[in-house]
Image: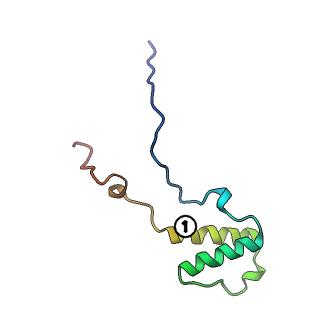
Amino acid sequence: MTVFELVEPSSGVTVSRRPPADEIPRTRQALVAQWERSLADAGLKLPEGWEKMSTNQIRTEYVSQELANAGPPPTGPAHDPGFKGPDN
């Protein structure tokens, strides 16, 4: 006996802690500009010696700062404020 279950695709919104690849600047100049804005949002400035960093290092630092600026991931109550527990 084989049992199949038809499931509707989820219509929920998925949240990623990583910016989509198409939102990450591709050129060094654009990366530096975005990283500088992201740092400014956190009250920081470009670190001393950033000019010597590779483009990949700058990209990594930019994405890390964007994640830091986004804050911690949402908790259960933020996802479903009316949820009382698995037994309710």
Above or below — where is 16 with respect to 61?
A: above
> x%, y% of residue 36?
64, 79
> x%, y% of residue 27?
77, 68
Query: Which residue is pictured at 58% across the width and 59% down the height?
Result: 18
Under tag 1, what secondary structure? Answer: helix
> x%, y% of residue 11?
46, 41
Above or below — where is 5 with respect to 37?
A: above
Residue 38: image quadrant is bottom right
Viewed as shown, does residue 37 lie left or right of 9? Answer: right
Quadrant that contains the C terminus: top left
Residue 48: image quadrant is bottom right
Query: Which residue is pictured at 76% across the width and 74% down the height?
Result: 29
Quadrant that contains the N terminus: top left
> Which residue position is annotated with label 1?
67
Query: Which residue is pictured at 59% across the width and 79% down the height?
Result: 39
> How crowded is the residue under tag 1: few (<14 C-alpha within 10 Å), some, or many (20+)?
some
